Image: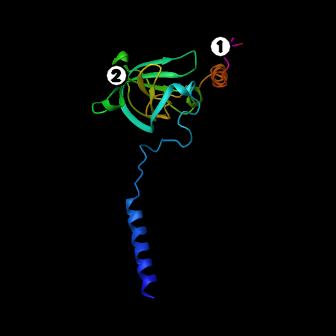
Amino acid sequence: MRRPAVVLAVFLLFCAAACSLRRQVVTASPYCRGGGPLAGVYHPRRLKVKSRCRAAVGTVSKVKFEAYDGDVHVDLRLDSGQEELLADGNERLGGNLVVEIIPYDRSRVAIPSEGARIEVVGPWVADTQHGWNEIHPAWWVSAGRIERASSSELRRAQLLLQGVEGAAFEDDD
């Protein structure tokens, strides 16, 4: 009768130890999304996910609307202490972190103004084609304005995602 009690005590001890060893998972931001971190990104094979969700804070150096894939490129001068988000290739961009807002998110992710101090949230990736790091796609930007992608931008993005070559050069009629 004593042996089952000892086995039960050891089992409960192991259960308590296992529960106390479980890692506490802290989400980087309430704006992190579930699902595939690169959903809706054109040519995702070029991107290596370093963290499925990271936040970065800094000042916007440049905003550029890309006609080819409909992404909005934001060059972000990071606040001090976030240098680990950069790669050597980011030096070619003046030491800025690239932030990209994809066409499908433009109805809910703000496009910041140049000179604005912002926080961004999204997957932190290495662009293996360019050799720099990015937040791509940005799931949240703390300040700016919503500028929905046009129907032609959304159509081009859909065609590119489907692998239709030359989709960005289609007539907008």
Q: In this rendering, would 170 be left or right of 108? A: right
Residues in magenta?
A: 164-172
Quadrant hosting residue 67: top right
Please state which of the two labelled residues, at mark 1 or mark 2, is closer to the viewer: 2
- What colour scheme does the image use? rainbow
Question: Among all residues in the image, which is located at the extreme right?
Answer: 173
Query: Which residue is label 1 attached to?
Result: 166
Residue 113: x percent and y percent?
A: 43, 23
**Magenta-highlighted stretch: main secondary structure?**
loop
Residue at disc 2, secondary structure: helix
Query: Which residue is at a point 47% across and 21% down the rendered structure image?
Result: 73
Q: In this rendering, would 12 be left or right of 39? A: left
Q: Amino acid at mark 1?
A: Gly
Q: Amino acid at mark 2?
A: Asp
Residue 85 highlighted magenta (yes or no): no
Q: Is residue 34 above or below residue 165?
A: below
Q: Is residue 4 above or below residue 155?
A: below
Residues at circles 1 and 2 in contact by the CB criterion of under 8 Å: no
| Mark-to-mark CA distance, 1 and 2 | 32 Å
Residue 102: x percent and y percent?
A: 55, 27
**Badge 1, how many Cα within 10 Å: few under 14, some, many 20+?**
few
Query: Which residue is label 2 attached to?
Result: 88
Q: Is residue 47 above or below residue 27?
A: above
Q: Nearer the viewer, residue 54 or 15?
A: 15
Residue 37: x percent and y percent?
A: 53, 36
Q: Nearer the viewer, residue 117 or 93?
A: 93
Residue at disc 1, secondary structure: loop
Quadrant hosting residue 119: top left
Q: Nearer the viewer, residue 162 or 13?
A: 13
- Residue 111 in sight: no
Looking at the rendered structure, which numbered label has been put on residue 75? none
Q: Nearer the viewer, residue 41 or 140?
A: 41
